[in-house]
Amino acid sequence: MGARGEVPNARMTALGLLRPAASTAATIVVLLHRVAAQDREAFAALYTATSAKLYGIILRISRRRDIADEVLQEVYVQIWERAAYYDAAKGSPITWMVAIARNRALDEARRKQAVSIEDTPEVLGIADAEELPLDRVEKSQQLQRLGRCLDALDSDRREVVLLAYREGMSREALGQRFSRPPATIKSWLRRSLLQLRDCLGQ
Amino acid sequence: MTERDEIDVLAGEYVLGTLDAGERATAQAQRRRDPALEAAIVAWEERLASLADRVPPVAVPEDLLAKIEAKLPRADRPQQIVALERRAQRWRRLAIATSALAACLLLAFGVRELSRPHIPTSYVAVFQKDDASPAFLLTVDLVTRVLSVRPVAAEPPAGKSYQLWIASEKSGGAPQSLGLIEANQASTQRALAEFDRGTVERATFGISLEPAGGSPTGRPTGPAFHAKLIKTSR
């Protein structure tokens, strides 16, 4: 590629991104910058590289495909509108996009408290698949550190944190799961969060 | 608990998602006003991010990208007149609204010129890289040969000036300075009496960011925009 210049054009980048191995955080940062400049081709490439990950996260929380489909659409419209505000100095672009996706899915889930796990066979059928190769090494180090700190929590409390983060379970739902009043779940969460924060050293 | 603990617990519960609808809405409003809460939320997003890595990706229904693209707001600036150099990073966060403003101004000019059917040949060029960069609207009246530049949300950074250039056959295509764009003025006028009509019509105009007082070399030295004229009346 050297003879044609060092900066790949948008189409070449888009083609490269069809292979998941090319979805490094650096590539995502470049795409987000292009999206901030309203580059629709970069937007399609960004979507190709990241949508399955965000959809998986949203579906776990939303529990219904029709809701997850709506949420995913809103999330990518928000990413298009807010790409100019992403600041690479402040954190990973994936974390930024995941936060937008989780927030939107959680807003929807808290608004519609009625959906229960029993209604949602499609989510329960999903087995753990292999991780996305997004910055695998760096992420796995983070995960190990977080894992050590989570292991230091009592098992019920660790489970509460994981179910809340991944499944978007409310205090009420967690209370039912663990046969405790929601107020107890709240106090577990307080202590767990402070312990995690101190364990992670920030 | 300390005040810091309170903020971290609120932020942590917000990120975990265990706040109820009312608490979430309150936290969302508060994070916009309270940098400490905002920072605490971002910190939890980072701390817990690796948990999201273990959530398996799920294939997205095929029609969703098209649906999303249909929802994206269209940038309605005229495409053929935006032909510009790579923008400077520091301009990125400037007015998102410049595109719409430039389009409105362009429309206003166009309508005004079209409503004067017997006065021929006014030209316009829009200088803008993208919606987040400064914009300039340049108009030329080829009868009076007067050029006018209006900055739109284009305050130069401290210690810098915007300088206007023309590259024409007359100079063999090399940029010639038309002087600085005056800061704090709605528009800057220049007489183009030395250029004939055809030369102006075919010329390329440029605006570059230069040290205060203008380019020290007589040639553009900073990041530059280029544009050619299009007719707004005949």
Image (tube, coloured by chain):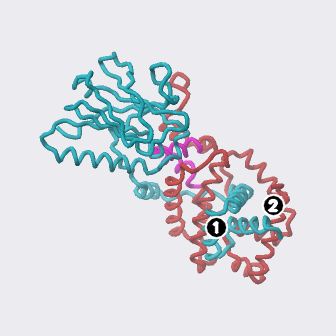
Most common secondary structure along the magenta stretch: helix
Under circle 2, the secondary element is helix
* Residue at point 55%, 40% (across, down): B90
Q: Which residue is the extreme one toward the top?
A: B172
Question: Mark 1: which amino acid?
Answer: Gln
Q: Please state which of the two labelled residues, at mark 2 or mark 1, is closer to the viewer.
A: 1
- Furthest-left residue in view? B118
Q: Is residue B182 above or below residue B1?
A: above
Would you call the spot at circle 1 few (<14 residues within 10 Å), some (14-19), or many (20 or more)? some
Viewer-closest of B159 and B101: B159
How many marks overall?
2
Q: Quadrant of residue A201?
A: bottom right
Q: Position of residue A49 (x, y in %)?
A: 56, 48
Q: Quadrant of the C terminus of chain A?
A: bottom right
Which residue in the protein does label 1 denote?
B30
Q: Position of residue A173 (x, y in %)?
A: 69, 78
Q: Residue at x 76, y 71 (%)?
A: A160
Relative vertical location of residue A91 with respect to residue A170 in this rendering, above or below: above
Q: Which chain is red?
A: A
The image quadrant where one finds the N terminus of chain A is: top right
Q: Which mark is residue A173?
A: none
- Taking the image as shown, residue A149 lies to the left or right of residue A6, namely right
Residue A59's spot in the image, x, y percent? 59, 65
The location of residue A177, given as percent across then percent down, is 74, 79
Residue at 49% over, 19% down? B217
Q: Quadrant of residue B14?
A: bottom right
Judging depth in this view, the residue of B13 and B48 nearest the camera is B13
Chain for numbered disc 1: B
Extent of the magenta region = A28-52
Residue B134 versus residue A70: which sits nearer the camera?
Answer: B134
